[in-house]
Image (cartoon, grey):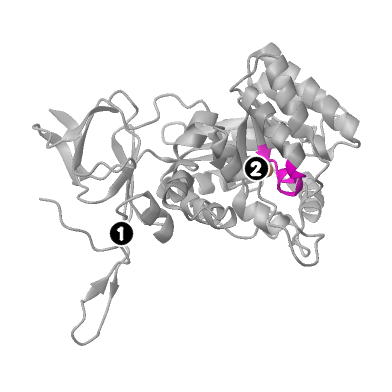
Amino acid sequence: MFDLILRRATLPDGRTGIDIGVRDGRIAAVEPDLQAEGGEEIDATGRLVTPPFVDAHFHMDSTLSYGLPRINQSGTLLEGIALWGELKPQLTQEAIAERALAYCDWAVARGLLAIRTHVDVCDPRLLAVEALLEVKKRVKPYLDLQLVAFPQDGVLRTPGGLELLTRALDMGVDVVGGIPHFERTMADGAASVKLLCELAAERGLLVDMHCDESDDPLSRHVETLACEAQRLGLQGRVVGSHLTSMHSMDNYYVSKLIPLMVEAQLGAIANPLINITLQGRHDSYPKRRGMTRVPELMAAGLTVAFGHDCVMDPWYPLGSGDLLEVAHMGLHVGQMTGHEAMKTCFHAVTRAPAKLLHLEGYGLEPGCNADLVVLQAGDPVEAIRLRAARLFVLRRGKVISRGAPVECRLSLPGRPETVDFTLPRPKFQ
Ligand code: FE2
């Protein structure tokens, strides 16, 4: 007897007609034709069932603030940072928490059940830190929120920056962040990487830095990040976010850099929606895409995730918490249209970020948390193509969101009455 059984699911690895039995909040069986009863049964015939989406890179302290106190007219990264500076003095803890909770509702409805969010620690009041620690507690039953202490204005460039960042960690922020390319000089940038990695090593924390979010091919802080991870024994615990300068780097230099990243088991996070809109702004034509070298990093064996970064904030006016939209953009920008490459883009918003966040109990094997999403799609590529509807979202074996399938009714002589854009497949028995 199971609490719940999902019947005849298709799994991301291509297995079809699989029953998933859930007991006590965990996956207890994954096999065809499970001979048992479930307290509740969901017919998932031909539908893709996946562990939840995971966003490895987000800014929840600024989300849904679009237009406050004004709109980013140039749309550039630097005007966005200036605008955030204007908004900061007006922020209240309640408003940050309210917007973050509203975003978490969207996330759940999108099957996005784990988010690593950076939180700005350069405000001496640390309002956003307090607000997001509270939100983390509130959403814990349905969403895993991981916080990164992010010195938006530079840990060395900001007076008292290191104390503020350390105070945020003392308050319970999980991960050490940084922004070396925003420090005053290259030397300060490198010094900040060293300092922050040492702090993480001392405290046994993970590292995730905004690193080289620039079109400058000589912005090479990722080299220092890899070197420090290796020196301090932080292999597999350090992530470089953005890494957009790698797009513009000389190929010869990259042929040295990628093996250094492999040696350090550095994780990489690209943010395709943001990279394609913010990078290349100083170019006339041709305009660079700016996304880091995703297929090459994956081919080297590194774990690469796609993050959303921003939704309706000073840097980006669009978005709705849909990681399939993120994967769709990443696939296009990275020209990853080969069949295997497309599947990899699905992994880049599911199992790859789960690995970078060190999430426990993530997956589809017996013993994993029964956190599952049923999609209106037959496989991972179709899920990306359609940004498929989330029909059921389960957390610890309980349905926490239901969505209606997309279907249009046609009035055409001699043609079907409905279309749903999925590819017709043979029906399962
Ligand atoms: Fe970011």
Task: Categorize mark 1 by other alpha carbons within 10 Å: few (<14), some (14-19), many (20+).
Answer: few
Checking the image for residue 404, the label placed there is: 1
106 sits left or right of 383 in the view = right
**Can residue 225 be seen by looking at this rendering?**
yes
Dot 1 lies on which element? Answer: loop
Q: Of the residues shown, which amino acid type is indicated by label 2?
A: Asp
40 sits left or right of 296 in the view = left
For the point 18% across and 85% down, the residue is 414
Q: Residue 290: where, in percent of width, then height?
A: 70, 52
- Give the vertical position of 146 relative to 232 (above or below): below
For the point 74% across and 21% down, the residue is 228
**Can residue 212 be seen by looking at this rendering?**
no
Work out whether mark 2 precedes mark 1 in sequence or the reverse, and give the earlier one: 2
For the point 23% across and 51% down, the residue is 46
Q: Of the residues shown, which amino acid type is indicated by label 1?
A: Ala
Task: Categorize mark 2 by other alpha carbons within 10 Å: few (<14), some (14-19), many (20+).
Answer: many
Q: Residue 5: where, in percent of width, then height?
A: 19, 37
Q: Residue 63: where, in percent of width, then height?
A: 62, 49
Dot 2 lies on which element? Answer: loop
Checking the image for residue 250, the label placed there is: none
Marks 2/1: CA–CA distance: 30 Å
The residue singled out by tag 2 in the image is 61
Which quadrant of the figure has residue 362? top left
15 sits left or right of 41 in the view = right
**Magenta-drawn segment:** 241-251
